[in-house]
Image (cartoon, grey):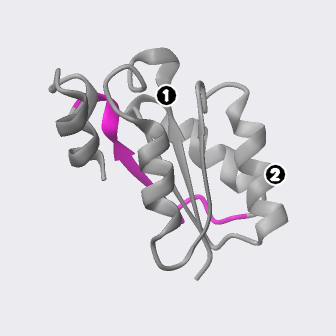
Amino acid sequence: MRVGVFICGCGGDVSDTVDVEKLVNHSKKLDCVIVARNHDFLCLDGLKLIEEDIKENKLDAVVIAACDLYQQTFRAAIEEAGLNPFCLEMANIREHCSWVHKDKEKATQKAK
């Protein structure tokens, strides 16, 4: 399996509380992860990045760590890139990590 991990900073909503670079580095060490990246706004201009990485890296599945609000947008983007839209796993790190922790290390650890 070839997995891509994409972490959204949500314009600071996540990146101000969660160390997204640490998450990227952690993700790169996981089995099957071929590409791991972060972007300030995956739901906007980051969609193109996801689509390109799916095609270039022949990804079988995608994990997006962001807010849950744009799940359908992400599903449509990976489908546009030729991947089954149900090969997407969402990790809601905005509401479940960033918004509930003030301590950056604790929020980052939970997001891992």
102 left or right of 33 in image: left
98 vs 109: above or below: above
Q: Residue at x 70, y 37 (%)?
A: 47
At horizontal 49% and vertical 41% (from top left) the residue drawn is: 21
Is 104 a magenta residue? no
The secondary structure type at the circle numbered 2 is helix
Relative placement, left or right, of 13 versus 32 is: left
- Tag 1 secondary structure: loop
Q: Which mark is residue 73?
A: none
Residue beneath disc 2: 52
Locate residue 49, reporting x and y percent.
Answer: 75, 43
Most foreground residue, 49 or 15: 15
Magenta stretch: give its range. Answer: 83-95
Mark sitting on residue 9: 1
108 lies left or right of 36:
left
Looking at numbered disc 2 in the image, what kind of residue is underneath it? Glu
Q: Residue at x 23, y 47 (%)?
A: 109
| Amino acid bearing label 1 | Gly
